[in-house]
Amino acid sequence: MSYNPLVSVIIPTFNRADKLPDAIESVLNQTYKHVQIIVIDDGSTDNTADLVKNYPELEYHWQKNGGQASARNKGLKNAKGPILASLDSDDIWYPDFLTRCVEKLEAEQLDFVFANWDQDVKVGESWDFLSNDPFLKPYHQSAKDHWSNLNDQELRALFLKACPSPSSSVVVRKSSIVSGWDEQINIGDDWCMYLEMILTKKCKAAYTLDRLWRKRVDEINVFDGRKWSEILEFLHIADLKIKMDKFKHLLHKDELKILQQRYMASLVELSKHNLIREFNFPHSMRLLKRSFAIDIPFTLKAIPNILMKGLGGKVKDITTKLNKK
């Protein structure tokens, strides 16, 4: 690659002194060397500040705890390169991650690219995450030289349904970012940022199923460390409501309907959880009331569907346990 643009790598961190060195060294070990490494310490109370003194190559900024979006935005303000990447401080890039991603981004002047990864689990071996992703799978057949390209309409359809590109997987052109990471968002601030790009302009992107990084998991991961009920409450209800309000003027009627129906289904799912698992009848009814306020027929249809889906899962668990005996 004749053009060698500076890549600003933002590493937001909070009390990750045990894992942060691995993330930093995975950037230093990249075959692509023209990088600016920015560590944003989001108010850590461990020995992060002392640890980063071992790495004179990087820039270190401390801020009062404001969440991952706030930390990434501080990194964005200090980024000098035309290309950005945000590596979570508990994740690891493999050596060719930046080389492969920057080459693709620049060769076709894309807005962003993202790469598949090895997903760690709390018990068992890591696994290939994107190859069987149901939302991404229809686009696999278009792959050429290990990359699948996505046009603006494909990106709209895909990212309104799912986010197959967590922060550590993405390399993005700084000029394509509209307003950065939304600091109101609880979990999916990266998803919100991609949506804003995709809905505001005709974006072009690409992804590879080659696994170029590793996502590590523990109890304090913003997403993987949470219970399913918390994911529902924060990502699929609170965050989704923020996105619907923020982007409603950019959405077609059918697109807004997709988001509203996912929002209502999540309200019903969380209502079921509060009723059956938490025995919290009043809160369960409040959640249902919020769904009914949007669309009564859809909510009435969703209730038995979600109950039957939950019952089917229980039957499957019981059957599996019986077969093991």
Image (cartoon, grey):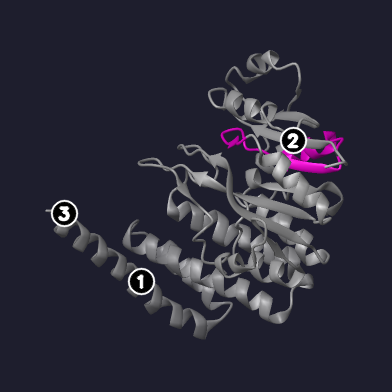
Residue 74: say if magenta: yes
Residue count near mark 2 (Cα–Cα under 10 Å), binned few <14, some 14–19, many ≥20:
many
Q: Amino acid at mark 1?
A: Lys
Drawn side of residue 197 relative to residue 136, left or right:
right
Kindly report which numbered mark, 2 or 1, lies closer to the viewer in this rendering: 2
Task: Measure how far apart labels 3 and 2 are at the Cα level.
Answer: 47 Å
Of helix, strand and loop, which one carries label 1? Answer: helix
Q: Dot 1 corresponds to which residue?
A: 309
Residue at mark 3 to residue at mark 1: CA–CA distance: 23 Å
Does the magenta portion include 46? no
Amino acid type indicated by mark 2: Val
Disc 2 from disc 1: Cα separation: 42 Å
Residue 191 position, x and y percent, is: 66, 55
Type of amino acid under label 3 = Lys
How far from the left and from the top, in percent, is residue 136? Answer: 58, 64
The residue under label 3 is 324
Residue designated by label 2: 9
Residue 48, placed above or below residue 200: above
| Quarter of the image that includes the N terminus | top right
SS state under label 3: helix
Q: Determine the secondary structure under disc 2.
A: strand
What is the magenta range? 72-94
- Mark linked to residue 160: none
Residue at 82% over, 50% down: 106
Which callout, 3 or 1, points to the residue nearer the camera?
A: 3
Q: Give percent across and percent down for residue 138.
A: 58, 70
